Amino acid sequence: MKHTLSCLVKNQGGVLAQVSEAFASKGINIESLAVAETETPEVSRATIVVTGDDQTVAEAEAQCESLDVVIRLEDLASAEFHARELMLVKLRVAPDTIPSIMQASEMFQARVIGMSERTITIELAGEHRALDGFLKMVKSLGIVALARSGLIAVSVGDEELPGEESN
Amino acid sequence: MTLPPVRTFEELLVRARLSTAAPMAVAAAGETAVIAAVTHAMREGLVQPILIGVGDHIRSIAEQQGMDLTDVEVIEEPDPVAACAVAVRLVHEGRAELVMKGIATTKDFVRAILNQEFGMRRGRPLSHIALFESPDQSRLMLLTDSGINIRPRFNRKAAIVRNALEVAYALGIDEPKVAIIAAVETLELPAMPATLDADLLRRMGEAGAFGQCIVDGPLSMDNALDSHTAEVKGRTSPVAGRADIIVAPDIETANAIYKTIRYLARREVASIVMGAAGPAVVASRSDSAHTKLYSIALGALLGRPVQTDARR
């Protein structure tokens, strides 16, 4: 089963290596990992997507949570969450493929952010499957380069910040 | 037969008269200006009208104004919405070749055209095309789309270009020069999406996707209209200063240009809706009698085009 984990960690060197090791030690492959600092500069949020049986993932989560550098870890599989991914894709552009490229872009509300003589660069942010759908539509047109940010996610509803008391 | 391009509205009337009068269904025709324009067009030999509306009212107006409806078919349909449906159904059934909006709203008229069951769909988007004379009266120019497509995306713009080309060819312009308008001549991303559409349309045009024509863009209006300005700015293009078709990025731009021509420059502007199974004349109530006549003439010419060498 796929698990999306939202992990608040200390914003310091070596943290990612420790978190990765917690999953690697259980033989779990990290499918995507996106990390950046939060509104509190000392704290970063890592969104980790892993696939594994629930028991093994739970053990890895427990190991991860026991790390000093991990402030809080939440498995979003048990909660509703807002999840988005950013993708940049560079496609070959030719007069006969322009209508198809633009149609796909319009359907998925993607933005063209770059244009050159032979390529067009498109930005698309959205749910994981929307990005997959877009790629499926444009794959035959000639993908030159592709970069995906990996999923970022926050839980739906009110969320406590570290050190804040709930009302 | 090779005919030169139509250069003025007077030439448009002459050209439209070369074909036999096209049957034209007029939806909700019960207004003096509409009946005057239609009967005038009939006298000019442009159309054979079929008037739809309140028969007694239509005949009463005609009688008061001294208009002869002897040879005009009048179909009784007092409801303007239903009258639109009757008009497009006549085209659907082959009894009329073009339609004209009377006092019905444009919304109801377009809705009838798009009706799945009896409308005039042919799988292409509708677009509005305005026609006006160049300042030196050396040619007729087309402007699109000031009336239907609000914020067209790329593929809709391509369809808008195709609809406008259809009109240009009917006017005898062999190789229309199409200016895709933006605020600047360079690609500005992501700030100015219109420049991207213009650039891509130009590429498609260069590849022959639109048939025989020259497409250039992004072009600002001054470069599209004035060859001296284009020269000063170093914008070399066969379209710069010689555009036959102005494709605006959105309805606000096109509508502002249209009304600037009409009310600031005080020039006549005929208009037509293309993309359906036949041309649709959508004259405004405020249009002059001449404008209405020119719009009908354009519709008649498109409904029964005179054969020229212009490529389609």
Image (spheres, grey):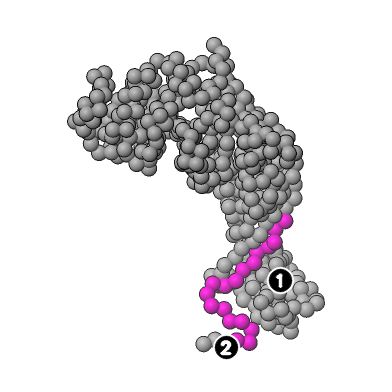
Residue on which disc 1 sits = A36
**Above or below, B311 relative to A88:** above
Determine the secondary structure under disc 1. strand
Q: Which mark is residue A92?
A: none
Image spot of residue A63 (x, y percent): 71, 79
**Residue found 33% across the figure and 26% down from its top:** B38
Q: Are marks 1 and 2 in contact (CB under 8 Å)?
A: no
Q: Is residue B305 among what the camera can see? A: no
Viewer-proximal residue among A72 and A40: A40
Three-letter code, disc 1:
Ala
Image quadrant occupied by the N terminus of chain B = top right
Q: In the rendered structure, does residue A150 fall within the stretch colored magenta?
A: yes
Q: Which residue corresponds to mark 2?
A: A165
Dividing the picture into quadrants, the one containing residue A12 is: bottom right
Q: Chain of mark 2?
A: A
Mark closest to the chain's N terminus, 1 or 2: 1
Residue at 64% x, 73% y is A6
**Quarter of the image that includes the C terminus of chain B:** top right
- Badge 1 and badge 2 both on one subunit: yes
Q: Residues within 10 Å of mark 1 (few under 14, many from 20)?
A: some
Please provide percent x and percent y for residue B21.
Answer: 38, 18
What amino acid type should be assigned to the residue bearing mark 2?
Glu
Q: Residue furthest right?
A: A13
User: From what the image shows, is residue A73 above or below residue B113?
Assistant: below
Q: Which residue is drawn at the image coordinates 47% and 41% (left, top)?
A: B263
Point out the stretch of residues depicted in magenta.
Answer: A147-164
Q: Is residue B282 visible?
A: yes
Label 1 chain ID: A
Q: Residues within 10 Å of mark 2 (few under 14, many from 20)?
A: few
In magenta segment, residue A9: no
